[in-house]
């Protein structure tokens, strides 16, 4: 067998089957670290075996069997392992006291990947640890790459991951899929982690572009997996729709110099029409499955933008309406700010200014650069160049993102020229 | 089943200014909580209420004895329970019902000290 063909098959198996292999091995090993080592060893032995015998028909099954056998060998050999606190692996998730659980399909045999992802995103773990663990364990991304993705040093990330794994075993976070009653709340924690993964990749200007693209791809893959494994939970499809519709704009987020491009300045002909079509279909399905949650509503908003031929021809009243519904299920100041920006397009900038005034007293937005940036944009459109310049300067003070700062600087120069003044030093 | 400590941290000043009725209601709430632990399938392995931090004595390092708690904080440890629960999810479910009107509770696994858990 050609060495590069085997390497390609192995890389593909790592991307698509890692979570499957690891999560099935955890059940045998009863320990996350041991399971990880066994899964890694299985991939190493696959290189040799597949070169000799060819790539098996079902690489995932081959790797899982190999990894589980390695875990069993270790358990037989190393008595010390048994003395270690084992991971709390539960055979079934059915709660006999909860009648709703009884009609939970396949309750006794949920996909092991779900157990893994629910454990990694357990609400008793710190949010940044959830995302890191998901990347490390569910996606199989090496720790140095996880560290690079989140712009922290490798020892810091290694310590964060180790601490989270230790809490899982010491505090006995169960390796299971939550029962039906707690599923929506627990799922939200999982979807939030996947969304954060995607946003970290999608935010322009920070870190290595390739690492960021990889993060977006990983997050999309995870969202697809979750939508496939939990189709009756509409929010999984809502998240997938949101990521697809946002990712469709990936090529147009920045210009050749890496500068941020706003929706208004993006070349819509370069949006990925296939991703948009799939995103709209998935989102429509989620919307049709009952009262929509926050990811589904955000996907619906992204869908309105994706269908609009231009910023001006966007169905802004519909966007405002969707933001109203989003606020009803997810009342955060950031959503309120986004709604105000939509109102500025639907009813004019003057209608949105009082909404921003209300938000100005919100302590959670005190350091949020998009608040002064939005105000600056409204004032600019109203012809108040001096007021706009002041707000652009405030936004520049607050942003940590180079691409965003460059954008604000450019806008500041424009309004300063309009006001007939020299651009003030940043 | 595993043991977890539920540590109750509260603003003690609030207790000092409490009416006798409010105190009585709180004692009742704790009695209810103890019943609920068993109703939820857990069990109680211990627990005590502690006197105010103003009565505390701290001994640090080489036997230096000082008046007051180990760490001076607005919300101080005022009592604890030790419960038996299936896992952390179960322990958190139980701890959510623990009365702590002037603060909150912390859930910590209890360990077997024969092997170093750190």
Image (tube, coloured by chain):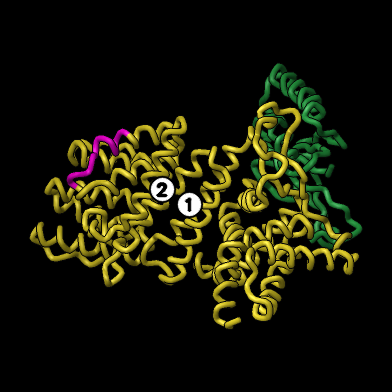
Chain colours: A yellow, B green
- Examine the rendered structure and indicate whether residue B73 appears above or below residue A102: below
Mark 1 residue element: helix
Element type where label 2 sits in the image = helix
Q: Residue at x 81, y 55 (%)?
A: A86
Crowding at mark 2 (Cα within 10 Å: few <14, some 14-19, many 20+)? many
Left or right: residue A16 compared with residue A83: left
Q: Residue at left 15%, top 61%? A: A414
Q: Nearer the viewer, mark 1 or mark 2?
A: 2
Indicate the position of residue A335 as horizontal and vertical percent values.
Answer: 38, 41
In this view of the protein, can residue B53 be seen by the observer?
A: no
Quarter of the image that includes the C terminus of chain A: bottom left
* Stretch of the chain drawn in magenta: A312-321
- Whole-percent x and y of residue A345? 21, 42
- In front: A357, or A258? A258
Q: Is the Cβ of the residue at disc 1 closer than 8 Å to that at disc 2?
A: yes
Image quarter of residue A144: bottom right
Provide the chain ID for the residue under circle 2.
A
**Residue A317 lies within the magenta run:** yes
Chain of the residue on which disc 1 is drawn: A
The residue that disc 1 covers is A195
Describe residue A332's horizontal placement relative to residue B31 as left or right: left
- The quarter of the picture where the N terminus of chain A appears is bottom right
Regarding residue A388, the answer to whether it shows in the image is yes
Q: Nearer the viewer, residue A335 or B55?
A: A335
In this rendering, the answer to whether A329 lies above or below A170 is above
Q: Based on the picture, tell me whether residue A382 belongs to the magenta stretch.
A: no
From the top left corner, tell me how far across and down residue A275 is, in percent: 37, 54
Distance, label 1 to label 2, CA atoms, is 9 Å
Question: What residue is disc 2 on?
Answer: A242
Residue A364 coordinates in the image, percent (x, y): 43, 45
Image side of residue A367 versus residue A253, left or right? right
């Amino acid at each position: 067998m050609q060495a590069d063909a085997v390497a390609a098959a192995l890389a593909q198996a790592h991307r698509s089957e890692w979570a499957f292999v690891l999560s099935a091995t955890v059940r045998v090993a009863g320990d996350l670290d041991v399971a990880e080592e066994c899964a890694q060893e299985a991939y190493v032995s696959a290189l040799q075996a597949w070169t000799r015998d060819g790539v098996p028909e079902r690489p995932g099954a081959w790797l899982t069997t190999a990894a589980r056998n390695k875990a069993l060998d270790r358990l037989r050999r190393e008595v010390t392992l048994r003395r270690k606190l084992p991971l709390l692996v539960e055979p079934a998730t059915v709660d006999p006291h909860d009648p709703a659980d009884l009609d939970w399909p396949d309750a006794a045999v949920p996909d092991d990947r779900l157990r893994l992802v629910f454990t990694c995103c357990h609400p008793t773990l710190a949010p940044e640890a959830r995302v890191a663990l998901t990347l490390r364990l569910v996606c199989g991304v090496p720790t140095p790459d996880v560290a690079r993705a989140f712009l922290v040093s490798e020892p810091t990330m290694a310590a964060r991951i180790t601490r989270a794994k230790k809490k899982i075993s010491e505090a006995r976070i169960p390796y299971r899929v939550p029962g039906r009653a707690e599923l929506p709340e627990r799922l939200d924690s999982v979807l939030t982690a996947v969304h954060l993964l995607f946003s970290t990749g999608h935010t322009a200007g920070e870190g290595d572009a390739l690492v960021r693209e990889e993060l977006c791809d990983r997050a999309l893959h995870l969202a697809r997996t979750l939508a496939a494994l939990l189709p009756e939970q509409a929010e999984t499809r809502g998240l997938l729709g949101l990521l697809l519709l946002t990712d469709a704009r990936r090529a147009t987020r920045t210009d050749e110099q890496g500068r941020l491009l706003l929706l208004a300045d993006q070349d819509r002909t370069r949006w990925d029409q296939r991703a948009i079509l799939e995103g709209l279909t998935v989102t429509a399905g989620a919307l049709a499955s009952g009262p929509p949650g926050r990811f589904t509503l955000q996907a619906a908003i992204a869908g309105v933008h994706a269908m609009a031929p231009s910023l001006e021809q966007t169905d802004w009243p519909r966007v405002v309406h969707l933001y109203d519904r989003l606020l009803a299920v997810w009342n955060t100041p950031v959503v309120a700010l986004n709604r105000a920006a939509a109102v500025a397009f639907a009813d004019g900038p003057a209608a949105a200014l009082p909404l921003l005034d209300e938000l100005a007293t919100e302590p959670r937005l005190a350091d949020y650069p998009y608040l002064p940036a939005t105000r600056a944009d409204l004032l600019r459109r109203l012809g108040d160049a001096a007021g706009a310049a002041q707000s652009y300067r405030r936004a520049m003070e607050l942003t940590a993102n180079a691409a965003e700062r460059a954008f604000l600087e450019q806008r500041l120069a424009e309004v300063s020229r309009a006001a007939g003044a020299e651009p003030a030093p940043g | 089943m595993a043991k977890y400590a539920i540590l109750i941290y509260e603003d003690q000043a609030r207790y000092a200014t409490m009416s006798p009725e409010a105190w009585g209601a709180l004692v009742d709430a704790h009695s209810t909580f103890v019943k609920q632990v068993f109703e939820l399938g857990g069990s109680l392995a211990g627990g005590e209420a502690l006197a105010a931090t103003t009565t505390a004595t701290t001994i640090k390092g080489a036997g230096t004895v000082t008046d007051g708690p180990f760490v001076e904080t607005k919300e101080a440890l005022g009592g604890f329970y030790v419960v038996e629960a299936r896992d952390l999810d179960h322990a958190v479910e139980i701890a959510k019902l623990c009365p702590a009107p002037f603060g909150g509770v912390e859930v910590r696994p209890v360990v077997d000290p024969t092997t170093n858990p750190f």
